[in-house]
């Protein structure tokens, strides 16, 4: 088995809406959010080693090896499964870090699913998602691989089927701290829960947006510019801003205009993660 390799995608996500319902005793906030994937992301390559060593070969600026969510995911899976094999990992990183498009969580989920396959552990998605939740609230949706309405801190997932438009995603050159936004006294924390599915139209608000836009002029600017063409929204706690278009041609046209001064990309929304589409083809 040593030397066996596998290359897998690690897609981004968007929060199509995000409501904050309240604060729990442990300080975490109860959310309702709608996750959808993008056909756009990083790519991870894995090669099995027989000596049990876990090694990420790609360096990340500002993230030490053992703090990387890829390494943390691999170590936890190895520990909890008792697997004696190790892994060499490389990543082609294109997703901005701290942008609210879930790159770190997605990398962790791709690692869990990739190693489950290569180490032949036979874990089901429930077990992998439960392990994933200990790494971050957004990991379970990437493990399950379907667009979903999420509740709690993001762990209670119900599959959803939103439209799959083309998106222009703008990437303001600032990293927003999730902790900082959730501790802002001005954050709306009392949105009434949505009780019907699918999420009724008109609920596309992100409760984090006013606080993020107030604190970060770069995000405000991106929202204003994209807002001239379509409804411009914030994903997660930002910094990324997105808007949907009915065709790639329209998204490309707007992107070409805006990326003269801002960083951004165009990607298709997808209710089935490209990671799961690739894994399906392997089986
Ligand atoms: C809000 C979301 C929506 O997708 O934001 P993004 O990270 O994608 O922007 C996520 O659920 C983020 O989840 P996760 O990525 O696990 O959050 P962390 O960075 O670990 O959270 C940092 C800090 O933010 C606060 N926090 C986070 C999530 C939450 N539901 N309530 C909170 O109060 C806590 O103080 C926590 O210690
Ligand atoms: N593999 C990884 N990819 C991205 N960020 C990582 C990774 N491992 C650890 N991190 C840390 O997690 C933070 C949040 O990353 P990321 O998931 O990209 O952003 P967000 O949660 O805003 O979508 C980063 O700023 C970085 O410090």
Image (tube, helix red, strand yellow):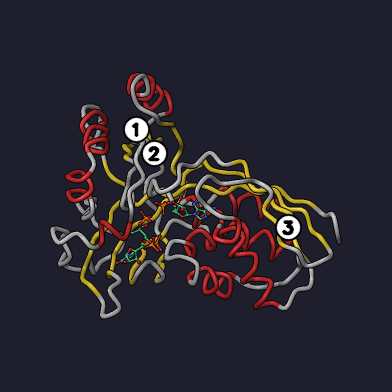
Q: Position of residue 220 (x, y in %)?
A: 21, 37
Between disc 1 and disc 3, whose residue precedes?
1
Q: How many marks on residues? A: 3
The answer to whether the residues at label 2 and label 1 have Cβ atoms under 8 Å apart is yes
Q: Is residue 35 left or right of residue 23?
A: right
Q: Is residue 159 left or right of residue 66?
A: left
Residue beneath disc 1: 245
Q: Quadrant of the N terminus?
A: bottom right
10 Å neighbourhood of mark 1: few (<14), some, or many (≥20)? Answer: many
Between disc 2 and disc 1, whose residue precedes?
2
Residue beneath disc 3: 283
Ligand 1 resides in the quarter of the picture at bottom left
Residue beneath disc 2: 165
Q: Secondary structure at mark 3?
A: loop
Q: Residue at x 39, y 46 (%)?
A: 99
Mark 2 vs mark 1, CA separation in Å: 6 Å
């Amino acid at each position: 088995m040593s030397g066996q390799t596998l290359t897998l995608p690690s897609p981004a996500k968007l929060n199509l809406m995000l409501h904050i319902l309240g604060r729990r005793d442990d300080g975490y906030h109860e959310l309702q959010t709608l996750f959808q994937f993008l056909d756009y992301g990083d790519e991870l390559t894995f090669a099995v080693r027989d000596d049990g060593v876990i090694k990420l070969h790609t360096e990340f600026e500002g993230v030490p090896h053992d703090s990387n969510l890829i390494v943390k995911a691999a170590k936890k899976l190895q520990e909890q499964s008792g697997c004696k094999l190790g892994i060499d990992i490389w990543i082609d990183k294109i997703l901005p870090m701290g942008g609210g498009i879930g790159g770190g969580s997605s990398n962790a989920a791709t690692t869990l699913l990739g190693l489950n396959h290569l180490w032949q552990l036979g874990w089901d998605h429930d077990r992998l998602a439960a392990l994933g939740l200990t790494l971050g609230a957004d990991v379970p949706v990437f493990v399950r691989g379907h667009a979903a309405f999420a509740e709690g801190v993001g762990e209670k997932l119900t599959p959803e089927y939103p439209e799959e438009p083309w998106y222009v995603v703008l990437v303001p050159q600032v990293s927003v701290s999730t902790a900082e936004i959730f501790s802002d006294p001005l954050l709306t924390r009392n949105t009434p829960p949505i009780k019907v599915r699918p999420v009724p139209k008109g609920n596309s608000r992100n409760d984090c947006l006013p606080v993020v836009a107030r604190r970060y002029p770069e995000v405000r600017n991106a929202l204003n510019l994209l807002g001239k063409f379509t409804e411009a929204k914030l994903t997660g706690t930002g910094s990324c801003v997105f808007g949907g278009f009915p065709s790639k041609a329209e998204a490309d046209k707007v992107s070409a205009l805006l990326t003269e001064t801002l960083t951004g990309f165009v990607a298709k929304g997808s209710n089935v993660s490209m990671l799961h589409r690739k894994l399906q083809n392997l089986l």
